Amino acid sequence: MIVDIQREQAPKNDGAEHLWKFMVVVDETPEFRRALRFAALRAARIKGGVVLLNIIPPADFQHWMAVENLMREEARQEMQPFLDELVAEVRALAGITPEVVVREGKPQDEILAQIEEDPDIHVLVLGAASEENPGPLVSAFSGPMLRKIHIPVLFVPGSLTDEEIDRLI
């Protein structure tokens, strides 16, 4: 597991109380955008924060350390413009700057680890696909992983429109 946190982008907390953070797992699906919108607007409404968790799958080149390191760095560089776009989107939409966390490993393990390491994360927000299969993370966190998580998990249907999400906030 490798963790890279852009803390300078995190909302400022004066230490008097914990900042409520909504964590969204980054991917490039339409339902992720629904989850991001919901989390950003809800966080702004309660004067909380957003954590964008980007998970890089583990490299499988343990015998070739230089190749593994190169692949890891390339994966980070490829995602950076997308992450920058998401930060700008949250700022424009909700007026808050999200914290960006990049971790490497199995998604379910890294989600649990990030929640464990950051006590200010109070809600995991996942986008559910509109098709028959809601997606691997929604399936995992509505089933076997639910026993391992100790915060609420909010599933945002991918079929919701911006207007419907705005009404729910």
Image (spheres, rainbow, N blue to C red):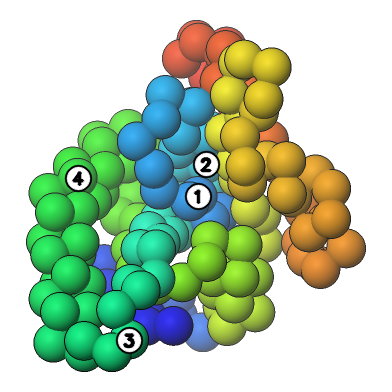
Q: Which residue is mark 3?
A: 62
| Disc nearer the start of the sequence (4/2) | 2
Cα–Cα span, label 3 and label 4: 28 Å
Mark 2 neighbour class, 10 Å CA radius: few under 14, some 14 to 19, many 20 or more: many
| Disc nearer the start of the sequence (2/1) | 1
Label 2 with label 1: CB-CB less than 8 Å: yes
Which dot, 3 or 4, sits closer to the camera?
A: 3
Is residue 58 visible in the rendered image? The answer is: yes
Identify the amino acid type marked 2.
Ala
Q: Position of residue 164 (x, y in %)?
A: 57, 11
Which dot, 3 or 1, sits closer to the camera?
A: 3
Report the disc number at residue 24: 1
Q: In this image, 15 relative to 102: left or right? A: right
Which dot, 4 or 2, sits closer to the camera?
A: 4
Q: Position of residue 59 (x, y in %)?
A: 33, 72
Q: Is residue 4 above or below residue 159?
A: below
Q: Which residue is mark 2?
A: 39
Q: Which residue is mark 4?
A: 82
Q: Is residue 96 above or below residue 8?
A: above
